[in-house]
């Protein structure tokens, strides 16, 4: 099972958007206060934020870092994601 903290750190490392990174950091900082049975709520928050910053107006990602972020979250390769979005 993947740890959300590690996923967030990887996403921040490749992201070029400071607002996105700050939102992820807020979630990461609140993870330690989250009961284990509520971790799915945190995963859902990260998913929603990721979609807000990577797939805007139902369009495909425009920047490489967006594909990288989705790849980290989904565990799909960037090439696989590009074929899905095209």
Image (spheres, rainbow, N blue to C red):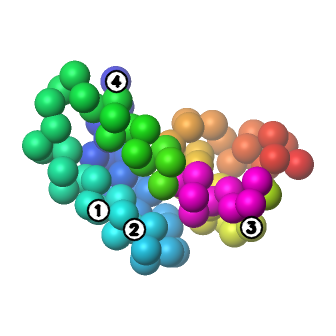
How far apart are the alpha carbons under marks 2 and 3? 18 Å
Look at mark 3 in the image and give the residue it sits on. 62
| Separation of marks 3 and 4 at Cα, in angstroms | 30 Å
Q: Residue at x 49, y 65 (%)?
A: 14
| Residue 72 against residue 22 in the figure, above or below | above
Closer to the N terminus: mark 1 or mark 4? 4
Q: Which dot, 4 or 2, sits closer to the camera?
A: 2
Determine whether label 2 and label 3 are within 8 Å by CB.
no
The image shows a total of numbered marks equal to: 4
Residue pushed farthest right? 86
Q: Inspect this view and state whether residue 57 appears.
A: yes
Q: Position of residue 52 (x, y in %)?
A: 57, 58
Q: CA distance from mark 4 to mark 2?
A: 23 Å
Q: Nearer the viewer, residue 43 or 71?
A: 43
Number of the front mark, 1 or 4: 1
Q: Position of residue 40 (x, y in %)?
A: 34, 30
> Which secondary structure lies at badge 4?
loop
Read off the residue under disc 2: 21
Q: Are marks 1 and 4 in contact (CB under 8 Å)?
A: no
Measured Cα–Cα span from mark 1 to mark 4: 21 Å
Q: Nearer the viewer, residue 37 or 71?
A: 37
**Pointer 4: what residue?**
1
């Amino acid at each position: 099972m993947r740890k959300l903290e590690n996923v967030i750190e990887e996403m921040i490392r490749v992201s070029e958007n400071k607002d996105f990174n700050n939102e992820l950091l807020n979630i990461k900082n609140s993870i330690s206060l989250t009961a284990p049975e509520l971790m799915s709520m945190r995963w859902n928050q990260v998913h929603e934020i990721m979609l807000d910053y990577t797939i805007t107006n139902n369009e495909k990602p425009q920047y490489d870092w967006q594909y990288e972020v989705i790849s980290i979250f989904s565990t799909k390769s960037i090439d696989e994601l590009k074929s899905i979005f095209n």
